[in-house]
Image (cartoon, helix red, strand yellow):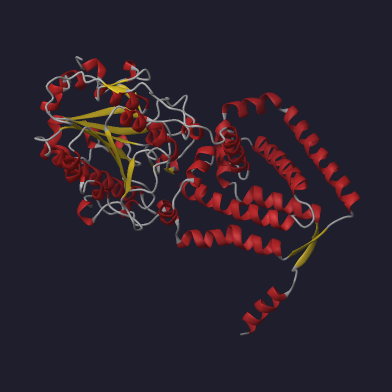
């Protein structure tokens, strides 16, 4: 009881200690620099293992951070801003540290578009205690600190002197080793994505600038001249094109691409009709970027996430040409792609297995009895809770990582649980193909599966995805793509399967999908580019 009494009396005090404002700024700067930048300093030392260089750079960062505090922290606002920054710093550092990920504008967009289910998958008791130590406790200490300020005139003069001094000393240090420093910064730009709070401040500014440049405007139509001009004759039946957009599947773990484990075993009965493209690369490293980019007429180099909201996409063009377009999703939202077509979000609970996407598909197709383009957006292999992405029947590899804290699992456990998600995806694709085969008397059917991006499973101690594209590991951008159609479809759509097989090793990307679907579906429009059509060279139209 005496212990709790002391704790109670301690919290009853207005303040635990008092310090001058410039002392608070210096302490806050030091704490921010060293408490939240473990990854930055590790990377810095690995790149440039020089004690002198690292020490001088650390001094420069401290001086500049202290100068920033002098600019931001004013009476009545200091504690509020310091606590807000501390709470953000703690959250950013936790995810960077646990999953060894960088934080840039793409990561920020990913965070802003993350739904409740995805957030829940990342929460853990480990996060609670770590966040308490790194964010809550420091915030309490800040709140209980009495900050003493000089008179307004002296305060301003002191701040001006501190800021000028910080910049002059920093400039002198940088100038003393300018050639070395310039070379380091030029060759290692991505390291800034590891520096808290510079990384997320830079991300916020970058995203805000894009938003301001892209205020609401009229929708820009794409392929306004799109019409259906069938190159096929005597088809006799309507056409059903199914586009399965996978989630977080990486090509390296597909046995169809040579992986030693039979993760695609359920697809074996259909192997004669399958084409597995082995060198396909994603438009981005996160769903927020890759998903809208897949459906955009712009390639990766010209794609702009914010601008894409005001541009029509593949669904609009296909719908304009006369196809019935239907989007079915097992994840919340479609990143603005499906807003102008019929949409069905199927999961109404914490998580659903992807077999929900196949249910009712045949019945709806038979009811429509017209040319259809159906998109099935999977939950797929989305981490870090891989173990929640498949039923027990798909658990072919063990032992498994049964926690979102991937850094607590062995490499074997992570690979096992991830491979189970790939096996389950294969099982769903096999079931979908069976359904499409059952429609053979009513439809000409075609399926294309591609993942939105890949995933890191601990290679170089990196987990998950959303790394800056310029430094993203191959595991995050090398994705699987599978095409299925039967011989009757090949004959009617003039597809030479043997010709297509000779191109399975060619390098393709998400840039090819927009044009490949238009070409295959007989949609004529000025935005179609035959050179990007995967099937064009193996067709006789």
Q: Is residue 61 above or below residue 94?
A: above
Please state if 1 lies on the left or on the right of 270 as rendered: right
Please state if 152 lies on the left or on the right of 287 as rendered: right
Q: Residue at x 65, y 38 (%)?
A: 54
Q: Quadrant of residue 120?
A: bottom left
Looking at the picture, tell me which residue is in the foreground, 276 or 137. 276
Looking at the picture, tell me which residue is in the foreground, 292 or 97. 292
Quarter of the picture holding the C terminus: top left
- Image spot of residue 279 (x, y percent): 31, 27
Looking at the picture, tell me which residue is in the foreground, 257 or 379. 379
Q: Is residue 127 above or below residue 206?
A: below
Viewer can see residue 171: yes
Residue projecting furthest to the left = 441
- Image spot of residue 306 (x, y percent): 51, 35
Q: Is residue 341 above or below residue 332?
A: above
Quarter of the picture holding the N terminus: bottom right
Q: Residue at x 58, y 39 (%)?
A: 203
Q: Quadrant of residue 370?
A: top left
Viewer can see residue 258: no
Mark count: 0
- Image spot of residue 211 (x, y percent): 57, 37
Q: Residue at x 23, y 49 (%)?
A: 355
């Amino acid at each position: 009881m005496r212990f709790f009494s002391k704790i109670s009396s301690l919290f009853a005090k207005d303040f635990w200690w008092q310090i001058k404002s410039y002392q608070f700024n210096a302490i806050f700067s030091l704490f921010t620099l060293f408490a939240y930048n473990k990854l930055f300093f590790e990377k810095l030392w690995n790149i440039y293992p020089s004690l002198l260089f690292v020490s001088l750079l650390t001094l420069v960062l401290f001086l500049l951070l202290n100068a920033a505090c002098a600019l931001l922290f004013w009476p009545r606002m200091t504690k509020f801003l310091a606590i807000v920054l501390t709470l953000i710093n703690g959250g950013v550092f936790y995810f960077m540290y646990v999953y060894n990920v960088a934080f840039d504008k793409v990561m920020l967009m990913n965070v802003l578009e993350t739904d409740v289910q995805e957030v829940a998958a990342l929460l853990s008791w480990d996060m609670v205690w770590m966040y308490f130590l790194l964010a809550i406790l420091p915030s309490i200490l800040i709140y209980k600190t009495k900050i003493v300020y000089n008179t307004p005139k002296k305060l301003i003069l002191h701040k001006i002197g501190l800021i000028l001094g910080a910049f002059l000393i920093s400039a002198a240090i940088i100038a003393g080793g300018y050639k070395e420093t310039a070379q380091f910064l030029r060759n290692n730009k991505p390291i800034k994505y590891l520096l808290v709070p510079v990384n997320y401040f830079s991300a916020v500014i970058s995203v805000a600038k894009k938003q301001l440049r892209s205020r609401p405007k009229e929708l820009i139509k794409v392929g306004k001249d799109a019409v259906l001009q069938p190159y096929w004759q005597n088809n006799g039946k309507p056409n059903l094109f199914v586009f399965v957009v996978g989630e977080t599947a990486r090509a390296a773990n597909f046995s169809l691409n040579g992986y030693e484990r039979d993760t695609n075993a359920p697809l074996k009965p259909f192997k004669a009709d399958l084409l597995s493209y082995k060198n396909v690369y994603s438009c981005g490293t996160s769903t927020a970027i890759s998903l809208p980019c897949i459906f955009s007429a712009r390639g990766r180099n010209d794609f702009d996430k914010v601008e894409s909201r005001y541009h029509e996409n593949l669904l609009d063009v296909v719908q304009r040409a006369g196809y019935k377009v239907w989007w079915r999703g097992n994840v919340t939202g479609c990143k603005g792609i499906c807003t102008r077509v019929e949409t069905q979000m199927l999961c109404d609970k914490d998580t659903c297995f992807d077999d929900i996407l196949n249910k009712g598909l045949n019945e709806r197709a038979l009811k429509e009895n017209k040319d259809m383009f159906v998109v099935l957006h999977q939950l797929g292999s989305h981490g870090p809770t891989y173990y929640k992405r498949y039923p027990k029947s798909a658990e072919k590899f063990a032992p498994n990582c049964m926690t979102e804290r991937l850094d607590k699992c062995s490499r074997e456990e992570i690979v096992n649980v991830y491979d189970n998600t790939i096996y389950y995806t294969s099982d769903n694709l096999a079931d979908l193909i069976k359904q499409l085969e059952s429609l053979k008397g009513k439809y000409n059917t075609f399926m294309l599966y591609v993942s939105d991006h890949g995933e890191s499973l601990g290679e170089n101690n990196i987990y998950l995805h959303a790394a800056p594209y310029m430094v993203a590991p191959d595991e995050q951008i090398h994705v699987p793509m599978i095409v299925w159609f039967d011989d009757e479809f090949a004959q009617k759509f003039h597809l030479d399967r043997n010709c297509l097989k000779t191109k399975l090793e060619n390098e393709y990307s998400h840039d090819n999908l927009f044009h490949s679907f238009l070409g295959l579906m007989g949609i004529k429009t000025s935005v179609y580019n035959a050179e990007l059509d995967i099937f064009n060279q193996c067709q006789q139209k």
